[in-house]
Image: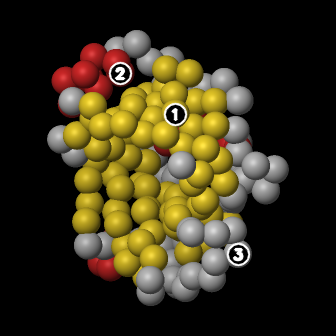
Amino acid sequence: MIEIERKFLVASQAFKVEAFNKMRIIQGFLNTDKERTVRVRIKGERGFLTVKGKSTNDGLSRFEWEKEISKIDAQALLQLCEKGIIDKLRYEVKVGKHIFEVDEFQGDNKGLIIAEVELNCKDEEFKKPDWLGEEVTGNIKYYNSQLSKQPFNTWIK
């Protein structure tokens, strides 16, 4: 249940033509404590409840527990969430042996596009596509829990 992932900004829209799947994700947070977050998510027609622990110092890994729940239950739990619902389109793109999840944010986070790749170990090598930009692994301001509190449209650019 330890998640290892790297996170990057996206430098171009080229990932869209390479995507094999696209879905809308709506999510909120029941708890955004720095030691743990509790997330409610609707991903397509499915609901999920997820608990994530504190990230390691390098931001590469953290505990993650996820349970599928009904979409109806997820919709009800979203009503209890802290202010700041995340709305995004997720594209799945296969690059070499890995699948990148590319999130194109909507609403207050519109204009932000982040790609994540899950790894089996911290030093696992992976192919970097041309559309991948600056690495932001471990930068807390790019965590969804923080984007719900301080959305992209409030950042000084």
Percent position of residue 143, x then y: 60, 44
Percent position of residue 15, x then y: 39, 74
Q: Is residue 101 left or right of residue 62?
A: left
Front in this rendered view, residue 36 or 105 = 36
For residue 139, above or below residue 15: above
Furthest toward the top, the residue is 80
Q: In the rendered image, which residue does mark 2 sit on? A: 78
Spatial CA distance of label 2 from label 1 is 15 Å
Three-letter amino acid code of the residue under disc 3: Asp
Q: Is residue 62 left or right of residue 44?
A: right
Q: In the rendered image, which residue does mark 1 sit on? A: 51
Residue pictured at 26% horizontal, 60% vertical: 22
* Residue 3 visible in the snapshot: yes
Residue pictured at 71% horizontal, 45% vertical: 55
- Circle 1 packing at 10 Å, graded few (<14), some (14-19), many (20+), is some
* Residue 42 visible in the snapshot: no
- Circle 2 packing at 10 Å, graded few (<14), some (14-19), many (20+), is many
Three-letter amino acid code of the residue under disc 1: Val
Residue pictured at 64% horizontal, 77% vertical: 124
Q: How many marks?
A: 3
Location of residue 49 (image quadrant): top left
Per the image, label 3 sits on a secondary structure element best described as: loop
Q: Is residue 10 left or right of residue 72?
A: right
Query: What label sits on residue 123 in the rendered view?
Result: 3
For residue 95, above or below residue 152: below
Location of residue 66 (image quadrant): top left
Q: Is residue 90 left or right of residue 112?
A: left
Residue pictured at 43% horizontal, 48% vertical: 105
